[in-house]
Image: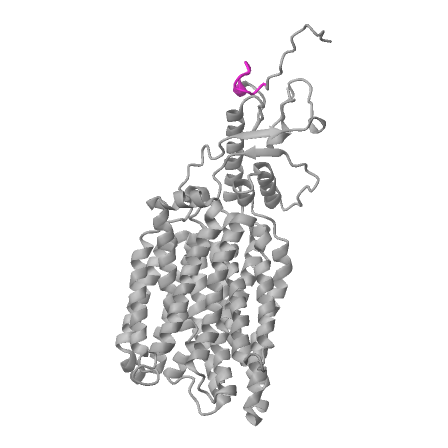
Amino acid sequence: MHTNNEAVAVPVHPLSPKSPISPKKTLDYEFYYDDDDDDYDASNLDTLRRTKLSEIDNADFQWFHIRACIVSGVGFFTDAYDLFVINLVSTMLSFVYFNGNIPTIIDTGLKMSAALGTLIGQLVFGWCADHYGRKKMYGLELSLMIASTLGSALCANSFAISLWGSLMFWRLILGVGIGGDYPLSAVITSEFATKKRRGAMMAAVFSMQGFGILSAAVVSLITLAIYKDLIAQDIGYIDHVWRIVLGFGIVPGIIALYFRLTIPETPRYTMDVLKDIEKGSRDIDVVLSNKNEDKNKEKTNLRIDVPRATFKDFISYFSKWKNAKVLIGTSVSWFVLDVAFYGIGLNNAIILEAIGFASSTDVYMSLWNMSVGNIIITMLGTVPGYWFTVFLVDKWGRIKIQLMGFIALTILFLILGFAYNQILTLSMPLFITIFTLCQLFQNFGPNATTFIIPGEVFPTRYRSTGHGISAASGKLGAVVAQIGFVNLKDIGGKNKFMNRLILIFAAFMFIGIWSTLLIPETMNQSLEELSNEDQIGFVKKSKVKVNDENSTTKSGNNLSSVNNFSDVTSSTI
């Protein structure tokens, strides 16, 4: 019992630097709080953050990682299906409404509208995911895709707007949703992934694009087979076919929607942007233990100083050449890759027709052969290419695979371009073999790695924005490719400029070799190491305000190890 005249001793935390008790001589501990020393508090929080992030980097591969890949991958399956199905649908529309000769402006508009929307979505959702959170945005982009796919399948001519106008509008909205999926799926997968398998996890998500492209051709083939007799009576029934093929894209989207809406926020975002290191550390424990989060856990009124995402900070970060060159490298590499990837991918049907594989006087057989040709190319080149990347990206490294792909594509496009007519005269199977090899090295090469690398090389506060900028650069390449392809291919006669277009693709692949040299290897490095920021002292200051009624007093010197910084408060002695 103290009298009013007695001095009251202020308790000092036994593990504070001010305490006469040496921390090394106390019980085992992890992180403690000293309300008299802000620098000591910051050091503890800083250590807590690095320790917990190291745990998720070095964790065993488990069910949660598989679930994250599946949830993200189904979305990418839907993206690819919806993007590339227009390659087949455009040809169907040409037979129904234009006797096989669709006007160039309509064909371009149908194929370019989704690419343009994707560019917008990548920039907008990329920025939003860094400012509002990955979880808040994830699912919203898929909802846009479902609604716009349904709208596309139900388009019709009216007095106010044509079928083409409404179809292009819905394809634009579809593209915005698809664009949002790129940075969100990449960043969520990379931030949950283990360091050892991060490349394979991201490549597995992206590889679903191959199955989406394949499924578009398979659904087209099945629907054509169902309508074969009706089409023989009246080609107007192809109008049923393209609507079913287009509308099927909502099926995988609906399956994935619930799981996307319920996926947790990434611990890295919680720590580095929301600045709640305690909750981020608990989230990591929940993820790694496959247990449900304790919803009743009270949130500590925590204030820390970490680098914040502001316009000034963005300029400051990317004005440094070591950071700027990475963004330039990822953006230019994706741009030049997509010039060829979409220039060919969105026009496979035209190329197959140009080499005589899909040309037929019978409408049904022409569409049938077109679908079969797409299946052959996808099965032999596209799908295997993705999975070669999945299995080798964490063994060979991203840069080796990307360089190999760009070099191989440069050589193959040069051969195909210079010997275009000779190869077709000699053997159509030879042409298809070389063309399939191009698809193989696009996907076992830069098409996969340009998706993976931007999800790894930027700090958490700019990771989604950086990926969005890189991906949008790619879609700008897709827009350029589509405009160039349709306006150049018929110079000198129908499809007469095709060989020179392929040589132009070769030139872009050559540029990709040099842009790749600006990018660092990311294999077996943590996301924090790749951010080019010092991680020791990342947390600058901290202050914890604990209400008296929530304080927990512990008697004696009974101190235990804690995972959460607030478990030991200033009242603990």
Q: Which residues are magenta?
A: 14-24
Q: Name, please, the residue furthest toward the top.
A: 5
Name the one closer to the observer, 10 or 164.
164
Please indicate whether residue 297 sits to the left or right of residue 125 in the image. right
Q: Is residue 511 visible?
A: yes
Q: Is residue 289 above or below residue 398?
A: above
Residue visible at 42% across and 36% down in the picture: 534
Residue 350: give x, y in percent of width and height. 41, 80
Image position, residue 99 (x, y; %): 47, 89
Q: Residue at x 43, y 84 (%)?
A: 358
Asked if one can make out residue 563 in the rendered structure from this viewpoint, the answer is no
Of residues 460 and 200, the one drawn nearer to the viewer in this rendering: 460
Q: Residue furthest right?
A: 1
For the point 58% across and 62% down, the residue is: 142
> Is the stretch drawn in magenta largely helix, strand or loop?
loop
The quadrant of the image that shows the N terminus is: top right
Vertical placement of residue 205 versus 41, above or below: below
Outermost residue, left side: 418
Whether residue 342 appears in magenta in the rendering, the answer is no
Across and down, in percent, residue 323 comes to 37, 46
**Residue sitting at x 69%, y 23%:** 553
Q: Quadrant of residue 530?
A: top left
Would you place residue 546 above or below residue 284 in this image?
above
User: Residue 118, how many percent across, how many down?
Assistant: 48, 64
